[in-house]
Image (cartoon, grey):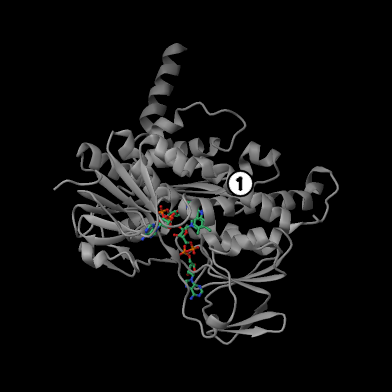
Amino acid sequence: MAYTHDVIVIGAGSAGLVCSGGCAMFGLKPLLIERADMGGDCLNTGCVPSKALISAAHRAHDLRTANEFGMASVEPVVDFRAVHAAIHEAIKTIEPHDSVERFEGMGVEVVRGDATFTGPKSVVVDGRTYTAPRIVLAVGSRAFVPPIRGLDAVPYLTNHNVWDLTELPQRLIVLGGGPIGMELAQSFRRLGAQVVVATLGRPFPKDDADAARIVIDRLESEGVEIIHDAEGDAVEKTADGLVLTLKDGRTLSGTHLLIATGREVNFDGLGLEVAGVAYDKKGIQVDARRRTSAKHIYAIGDCRDGPRFTHASGYEGGNVALEISLGVPTKANYSALPWVTYSDPELAQVGLTEEEAQRQFGDKVTVWREDFDHNDRAVTEREVTGFVKLVKKGSKVIGGTVVGRGAGDLILPIAMMIAGKSSTFGVASLIVPYPNRSEHIKAAAFASDEAKVFNKWSRGWARFLAKMRG
Ligand SMILES: Cc1cc2nc3c(=O)[nH]c(=O)nc-3n(C[C@H](O)[C@H](O)[C@H](O)COP(=O)(O)OP(=O)(O)OC[C@H]3O[C@@H](n4cnc5c(N)ncnc54)[C@H](O)[C@@H]3O)c2cc1C
Ligand SMILES: NC(=O)c1ccc[n+]([C@@H]2O[C@H](COP(=O)([O-])OP(=O)(O)OC[C@H]3O[C@@H](n4cnc5c(N)ncnc54)[C@H](O)[C@@H]3O)[C@@H](O)[C@H]2O)c1
């Protein structure tokens, strides 16, 4: 069969861009199909706008807390229209990196429109049929909106439309205490909104409990109200906003409601049945190589069942580009997957949390913790909240948590230890610039090996040498 392309990639988010770009760099003829904005969720409705909003909120917080270093604290006067403009300027600045022009320059043919399978190896867009021996699904996810009575009659926000706000919400109700809910709750609070978060269980259910507690305490100390074990039941419009009733009967009133209760997949119109691709409500089922039930079709990034981060999408895009281009089977390995919540303080995790490790390996697990209250840099910055935690099974690092300023930038050496590209011994023997928070990564690594260094043999040998000298 003569194909129109070597590979068809559907979806130009983080996953599809990396995959199609990678295939083009290897000299294949890829087709990339995108129905909405190039760059997908991350650029347009996810990481980029949220990190820009977080930066604006940081500035407001700095003004409010300037007195800690002897300057007059001021209550910031926030022009939210300008915050909105700054968010969209960040998107515009990064946009060329994900643009049609850039990818066509790399050798990717880009078609705009809705892709629908017409057979296992053929896809139609606007009446035109494209064929390829390999197809990659990179079609992403969307906000999951739980069934709440009355929601269809009330305007609400999700990650899709929250970036359209040009006025600061007066009182924001956030449903869901995951990374989206907590990052945005702190940001809107710092910019002057009243904020209440209501969530099932506790906020940050997937993170280390001690670290999550630190971030929750900080948000509460800044005035964010956080309600645990809460589930939305019904919502009603009022004269000045809405009232959300929780399943336990409590009511919350606000001017705006943000739903941040996780993600769901939506494959309407894609025709996955025609292609023989199996999926359920968690996403497309894939093997470690990201092959679907139709082995020539791959699914990468948010659309498959698995971790949903830009770096996971990029990693899988790269792996699958390598596999398709060079025929090298590439399995995804998430034992050293890091993730970071960009709250202040930041919350970073890689590998297993202490709780997960103890559940899996019981008393084989040891935990090494260094608090930033004895880190000189943290003391000089007057920002000593947080810690570094290493989780080991025997001599192997299997998890790490960092909570504190710059946690996201500190997690990489722990990822390297888990991935076997470094070790606690290796990190403990590095020279770390002073004064720096990364000293605490070294300190935790060294503490975990201290008993091996200062043991009865090394001490006996030292005593023996000393005696010989004198
Ligand atoms: C508010 C928020 C903040 C986030 N912050 C972070 C963060 O700080 N760090 C991080 O790592 N992750 C973050 N994430 C997660 C991250 O944005 C996603 O994991 C990532 O964008 C997923 O990329 P993707 O390529 O898999 O999917 P997407 O970016 O969703 O791309 C899928 C693309 O496919 C297109 N498409 C779908 N169906 C079709 C079709 N039939 N035909 C043609 N095109 C189609 C869509 O239009 C879309 O552009 C955040 C998410 C949100 C919502
Ligand atoms: N910094 C980052 O890397 C970052 C930032 C934002 C989002 N993301 C990604 O985006 C995705 C979505 O984030 P998210 O925060 O929406 O999802 P999430 O699944 O991580 O968290 C959802 C939260 O909502 C709660 N919840 C679910 N249903 C509820 C209900 N009916 N009532 C009350 N609470 C309910 C859950 O218990 C959980 O705490 C995640 O996969 C995440 O990885 C990443």
The percent coordinates of residue 389 (x first, y second) are 48, 48
Q: Secondary structure at mark 1?
A: helix
Q: Nearer the viewer, residue 137 or 203?
A: 137
The percent coordinates of residue 362 (x first, y second) are 33, 58
The image quarter containing residue 29 is: top left
Amino acid type at mark 1:
Ala
Q: Which residue is mark 1?
A: 90
Q: Kindly identify the residue that appears in the image at 59 percent across and 51 percent down.
A: 51
Q: Kindly identify the residue that appears in the image at 76 percent across and 56 percent down.
A: 79
The image quarter containing residue 174 is: bottom right
Check disc 1: other Cα within 10 Å, few if <14, some if 14-19, many if 20+.
some
174 vs 416: above or below: below
Residue sitting at the far left: 1
Q: Kindly identify the residue that appears in the image at 71 percent across and 84 percent down.
A: 239
135 vs 330: above or below: below
Q: Kindly identify the residue that appears in the image at 34 percent across and 38 percent down.
A: 22
Residue 455 in sight in this render? no
The percent coordinates of residue 414 (x first, y second) are 43, 41
The image quarter containing residue 124 is: bottom left
The percent coordinates of residue 418 (x first, y second) are 36, 42
Say left or right for 300 vs 387.
left
Residue 274 in sight in this render? yes
Say left or right for 456 vs 179.
left
Residue sitting at the far top: 469
Q: Nearer the viewer, residue 109 or 339?
A: 109
Q: Nearer the viewer, residue 251 or 460?
A: 251
Q: Nearer the viewer, residue 342 or 207?
A: 342
Say left or right for 202 vs 379.
left
Q: Is mark 1 within 8 Å of ligand 1?
A: no
